Amino acid sequence: MKRKGLGIAAVLLLLGGAWWWTGPRYALDGPPRVTVSAGAEKTEVGCWSAQWDSPTVCFNACGDAPTAPYARPSQPVVYVKEGTEALTLSYPVAPSEVTVRFTPDSGELGVTLYEGAGRRELILPLPEDFRGIYEVSEGWKNVPPATGYAQRGFLAVGEGESPGDPKLAEPPELVVTNGGENPVTARLGSYSWYIWQGGEEMEGIIADAPHPLEMSHLPAMAAQPGDRLELQWSAAPDEISVWTWSAGKGVDQEPVEVETWLGNEVSVPKLDGTAVLEVRGRWYLAGDNWGEASYFLTLV
């Protein structure tokens, strides 16, 4: 009888060891990995933020939130196969709790797609407009002897599509108003632009325009010295500068820089007759690549 009890104990010990080897051991060095698929190949998604405690490691790490514009090119990309209706998250060990939040590329407000208990395979219906950033937050209490949390992010786009931000597929439009009234769409001049194609692949575009004083039929705005002009962008730049060109001084002049406030307000300076207002914008796009563009209108 005693031998039988010892045999049962040995079997249970072996089963326990096998359970540990195939399950919680994944969590000893950090949060268990997760793979994401949407009808195409699976994509492994790491953590941008995590806190972890186990017998082998203790750490607290934090990076850039996936929704930050400059963080987009570093996000894993999940390509959604045509006709796919669900997103699948797969774990070697189920988390205790999971929250999945979605911020669409369309510019609409973000929504929570799931909040509840974790599963080894979590299947989520895809939103109709599924393109955008997905944020996954996980808590772990059931992988002894390890505990902690993790936050991850990934980008989902249609199979074969460029993962670049569609709002920055080309230089954004600029509308200028005087005191919030009389909107005028500034004309796009010279620009250099890059479109992220995924991975390290970029597509560049360079366009040249005539000198500001040689551009014909520029949009015009009535303005007096001291007026506050407001710059309204379809996608705001990371850096701006504003300059004026005096129409009576010719193309060899140097432009005069104008003071700006809050990145979107300009005070009209004292002008010597008609002048051309130039707004230069600079956008971070991907990697080491910045997009630059100039916009023009006439102040009368």
Image (spheres, rainbow, N blue to C red):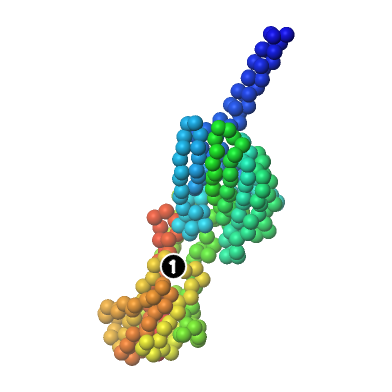
* Residue 196 shows in the view: no
For image coordinates 47% across by 82% down, the residue present is 177
For image coordinates 65% across by 43% down, the residue present is 118
- Badge 1 marks a residue whose secondary structure is loop
**Number of residue marks:** 1
Residue 221 placement, left or right of 121: left
Quarter of the figure that contains the N terminus = top right
x then y, percent, for residue 53 = 50, 37
Residue 231, compared with residue 249, is above or below; it is: above
Residue 198 placement, left or right of 293: right
Q: Amino acid at mark 1?
A: Pro
Residue 6, compared with residue 162, is above or below; it is: above
x then y, percent, for residue 72 = 49, 55
Residue 28, compared with residue 107, is above or below; it is: above
For image coordinates 60% across by 56% down, the residue present is 102
Where does label 1 land, which residue? 237
Quarter of the figure that contains the C terminus = bottom left
Q: Quadrant of residue 246?
A: bottom left
Toward the viewer: 173 or 7? 7
Residue 81 placement, left or right of 247: right
x then y, percent, for residue 77 = 55, 49
Residue 225 placement, left or right of 133: left
For image coordinates 59% across by 35% down, the residue present is 143
* Residue 13 shows in the view: yes
The residue lying furthest to the right in this view is 1
Q: Residues within 10 Å of mark 1 (few under 14, many from 20)?
A: some
Q: Quadrant of residue 222?
A: bottom left
